[in-house]
Amino acid sequence: MKRHSPTRRLTLITMLLAMSILMHMIEPSLPIPIPGVKLGLANILGLITMFLFGIKSMIMLNFMRVIIASLLRGIIFGTGFWLSMGGVILSTFITIVLHKKSKLSPVGLSVASSAFHGLGQILVLMFINDTVMMIYWLPLLWFSSVPTGMVTGTLSAQVLKRLKV
Amino acid sequence: MTFSMNKYDKILIIVILISSLLLYGTMEWFVRSTTSDQTVAVVSYRDKEILRVDMKIDDTYIVQGTLGEVFIEVESGRIRVEKETSPYNLCSIQGWVEYANVPIVCLPNHIVVMIQNSEEDPNGEDSVIQ
């Protein structure tokens, strides 16, 4: 990570944030046949930010992304917002822990983050619906987190290889 | 710094795949072992119970949902929504349900079908003698 002037750094992070909000907003319109499963394209930007600007920037980017995208969509503090929030809290947490404690590449980090995003969403659903039944969805989410995480992880690895900032 | 996949990634992926399969297996086993022979299906409309169906009797039931009539069919211990009016027809596509872990939810119709163990305990006769 190179030292940037604060203005340049701020501009770059803001552009990454804008892109991740865009990904977050267009994601529901992508046709995926399995209910509850999505690609998690916004996580590409989260990973790129972490490798380029460090952990603090990624935390900020992920939370701002959820809050601003929910504001734009008009669902802030609704069920969808809390689902995204639960997912993003756990996935950001596990990405930071694994990045610090292990030698995982972006692909592995993305798979782990995708799995924990699913876990976070299910925990929120269990809390909102007041039922443990939602846990039956977890095996499917974890199983599908491997292909989706590998797609987003590979994409961010390819971007990181080519991107010079 | 290299960004390509390494052996730790492969280990993580295998761990996640195995744990998802193990979780699935445990849950299936748990549901099968806790579902008794006598089950009832509880049909509710907007969280209010409107019908209680004995899963032993093959029959077709019609309940009124928000968008129209919902046809519920029981056959050999399984239950399904046969036909209903909704944009995507997800609950009739879902098909047969036999165990208590999967509810049938017709969200546009506000109809939920859930399988429960019936209260009548097959060994309960002794306990009601006073």
Image (cartoon, coloured by chain):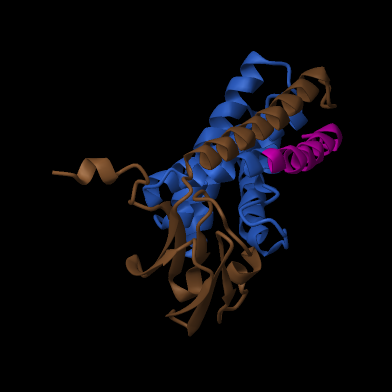
Chain colours: A blue, B brown
Q: Which residues are magenta?
A: A143-165
- The quadrant of the rendering that contains the C terminus of chain B is top left
User: Dividing the picture into quarters, in which one does residue A5 lie?
Assistant: top right
Q: Quadrant of residue B50?
A: bottom left
Is residue A87 at all visible to an observer of this figure?
Answer: no
Instruction: From the image, give the main secondary structure of the stretch colored magenta.
Output: helix
Confirm whether the magenta stretch covers residue A162: yes
Q: Where the N terminus of chain B falls, by quadrant?
A: top right
- The residue that appears at 61% across and 69% down in the rendered structure is B90
Residue A38 in the magenta stretch? The answer is no
Residue A63 left/right relative to B121: right
Residue B93, horizontal then vertical, whole percent: 65, 68
- Of A121 and B88, the residue lying toward us: B88
Q: Nearer the viewer, residue B33 or A108?
A: B33
Query: Which percent across, then down, holds residue A139?
Result: 63, 39
Residue A135 lies, in percent from the top left, at 51, 41
Residue at 34% over, 46% down: B121
As displayed, is residue B89 above or below residue A84? below
Q: Furthest residue to the bottom?
A: B68
Tell me if residue A110 comes above or below residue B99 in the rendering.
Answer: above
Q: Position of residue B76 (x, y in %)?
A: 59, 62
Which residue shows up at 73% across the image and 63% down it? A31
Instruction: In the displayed orientation, state which residue is furthest to the left.
Output: B130
Q: Is residue A26 among what the camera can see? A: yes
Task: Give the mark count.
Answer: 0
Q: Residue furthest top?
A: A101
Q: Residue at x 54, y 56 (%)?
A: A69
